[in-house]
Amino acid sequence: MIEVTAGWYLSLAAVLFSIGLLGILVRRNALIMFMCVELMLNAVNLTFVAAGRALGNLEGQVAVFFVLVVAAAEVVVGLAIIVAIFRRRESASVDELASLRG
Amino acid sequence: MVELVIFVLVGSAAIGGALSVVFAKNPVYAAMGLLGTLFSLGVFYVVNLGHLIAAVQVIVYAGAVLTLFLFVIMMIGVDRVEDTSEPLRFQRQLVIGLAAIMVVTVGALVFGGEFAWVPLSVAGPIPNGTVENIAGIMFTDWLLPFEVTALLLTIGAAGAIALAYYAPGAPEESE
Amino acid sequence: MTDAIWLVIALPLAGAVFLHFFGRRLGEPLAGIIGTLSVAASFAVGFAAALPFIVEEGAHGETVMLWEWMPAIGANLEIAWDSLAAVMTLIITGVGTLIHVFSIGYMHGDERFARFFTYLNLFIASMLTLVLGGNFAMVFMGWELVGLCSYLLISFWYTKPSAAAAGKKAFIVNRIGDFGFMIGLMLVFTNFGTLAFDGVFERVPEILDEGTATAIGLLFLVGAAGKSAQIPLYVWLPDAMEGPTPVSALIHAATMVTAGVYLVARTAPIFEAGPNAGLVVAIVGALTALWAASIAIAQSDIKKVLAYSTVSQLGYMFIAVGLGGYIAGIFHLMTHAFFKALLFLGSGSVIHGMHDEQDMNKMGGLLKKMPVTGITMGVATLAIAGIPPLAGFWSKDEILGVAFEYGGVGIVLWVIGLVTALITAFYMTRQWFMVFTGEPRWDKGVEPHESPRSMTVPLVVLAVLTVGAGFLNTPFRLTLEHFLEPSFELVKVAHPPEGWGMFALLAAISVGAGFAGMAMAGFVYSRPREIWERFQQGFGRLWEAWAAAYRVDDIYGATLVTPGRKLSERLAFTFDAGGIDGLVNGVGRAVRSVGTRTRVLQTGLVRNYGVGFVAGLLAVVIWLVVAGGGV
């Protein structure tokens, strides 16, 4: 009988986080990159919940709550930026945004 | 036994959704993949007795945030299929290298037993994330951060409006 | 009255500020009258404040704190009001008032009439700051301010290249002296921890050893030699005659140049602790007195004679204060202020009447045309020649007496002083005869005329002072001596020999020297021109050397100025342009080339940065896993 431990959830979270991280590196579309960021945030949320359960502590779930709020704010502003950029350049590719090149 | 089955099934769905976010050619599919992952995490929250945050996860993330994503995708254009060629030199090779290192690292962590430090069953009473319990903590110990996040959200909303109102006549940035 | 003592400085300063802003609008002569009144009011306040010292013999001075500026180092705006300060104040404001009056006539028609009085008032305020300051910081402030005013006034007619150059020279030479003074001040501060007079002089015996006191004294001497035109820094004063004549009278004869004498007298306790420094002061003074007097013999410019005469007389004062005869020095300072101001103003009157002619060879026979000027200058000539009972006799005799009483080196100084007295009598008499007697040698078109009332009245007043001031301090009645004594309580003041016989003997010798000089000059220069020209040729090369002032300016130019300029050029165009600039530019080039190479890393592409970020993140994670977070 295999029991599901906190380590299982943490491992799953690590995998999800890694996928999100690699996604940011390989995709050019700013929208997709944003989704990857959301993915990473959710992976972290999962670790909070699992660790909170393992430690018998409810504050892990409270932390998730705060992460949710920050993520929401970030999505609002981030999407507004993407829309603004798109309106100006007709593209959502971050590779074209290289005006800071040295 | 039930938890194991749920973990395997829902966990596979979460990873599948995450992979489709990264590899889907059409942004809509990517959004759908993300939706799947978010739902899966919601299920895990329920399993871990986070009732309130599971509900919030579905309502805020799967509902509001993802709708916003889809809205922007529609606005920018769905039919646009991205080409998957990599214009940046060495970028793909570097990412593959990093991915390999990451796989090794995460694999070492997962299978090396680093994450197995606490069996879930022995850690005393499982905290029950009901509305009452969460609110009890949030509005006492975490009141100040709560208020600060409220301020943050307000600023975020104001910022989004300011960005949406940007003047189209502004000079084109030079490269 | 001491509560209002700040008015003494504030009134001329207010006059300067007022004239600076409104002078041009007020025009002539209103600006001059306002300038004069502010100094006269300052004199009145000073006189009222000095009354306690006069009424009550031996009254002590007091320090009036006006504003605490930097109390930690004793540098405050405070006025040390004692009898020495009172004497200096009355000389400065008194002579200053007369010279202001004179200037109203002399500067008539100058387009910068009001500006002239602005500077004069500023000078009076600065000079009073110097003599009234209750600490070294204020003295130094005044010291620099009078230097500035001197510069402004010497080059008042700055469109004349020689005047601009003379102003610059005075400023630079004074700077050399100030350098020594400043180092002396630092030494004072390191030893006493304060710059306030109160905290320094009383503690001199317990704090200073003889070596340190001598060092400070010698450094002060460097400063005093710069300001008071002593060897080797006297070269600026003759050139300073490029300024308007009232300036020469006020700054370069009566007041500013005596600052060095005042400084030595004020810091008497330090010189007493290091007597060798005082001796050096006296020796420098004696050499300067003889040296400058010999140059004055052969000058033909009426103001140059007086300039070298001033240098020579300052040498006398240095002899006195160097040997500890502080009261004798201050006494001579005062009488000299009167008769030398009179001489300068008289020469100004002559120059004015002769349409800006300064060459004595082109004068002669002016006594009939300018009787007031001629007679008053004659009085001053007698005074400086040391003929009793005029002021110069009493003060000069007291100095010579001090030197004689000192013994040893003092006897040598006494002899030098006597010789100088003879020469002084000679050249002053020569000047008077060349200017006022004989047949006219004027240029064509020159119509000499007596100067207006505003110029002759100060001459008469000064002539009266020249006759009478000597009686302030005769061996029969030592008024000034008692007046000044409280200011020199901390030191032993040197006096002339006691006893009437000794006094009569010394007086007879010096008066004899004076008469001899006058007789020689009178014998030669009262006769026609051919005779004295032959007399001058009889001296041959020596006369030429005197006339050329021993070519000291050329020597300084060849040994100091030219090499200095060459060194500066090399520093500026070779070392600075090549070395320093090269270093700076090299650093700039290196940074730029490094930047050019590393800017490639700044692709501006988010995903490239992301790769770097993730690589770093992984490195940290691996380090945590492998090392467990430890080191």
Image (spheres, coloured by chain):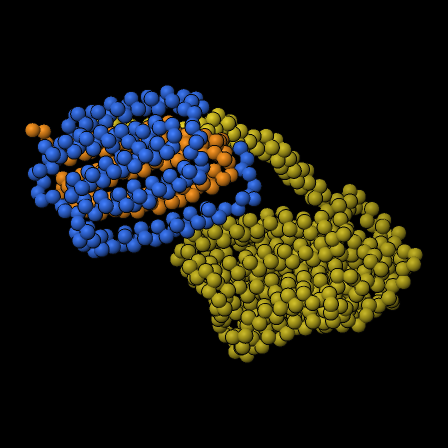
Q: How many labels does the image show?
A: 0
Residue B110 lies in quadrant: top left
Q: Note whether C580 is above or below C429 in the view shown.
A: above
- Residue C429, x across and y down, in percent: 77, 60
Colour assigned to chain C in the rendering is yellow
Residue extending farthest to the front is: B79
Chain A representation colour: orange
Asked whether C413 or C271 is in front, the reply is: C271
- For image coordinates 67% across by 49% down, the residue present is C168
Picture coordinates of residue C20 (x, y %)? 67, 64
Residue B44 position in % (x across, y down): 19, 38
**Can you say which quadrant of the picture contains the C terminus of chain C?**
top left
Q: Where is residue C539 in the image (x, y as percent from the top left)?
A: 79, 46
In this view, C196 is above or below C541: below
User: Measuring 35% from the left and 32% from the top, which residue is drawn there?
Assistant: B29
Above-or-below relation of C573 to C294: above
Residue C517 shows in this picture: no
Name which quarter of the figure residue B114 lies in: top left
In the visual, does A31 lie left or right of C386? Answer: left
Relative to C469, does residue B129 appear above or below in the rendering?
above
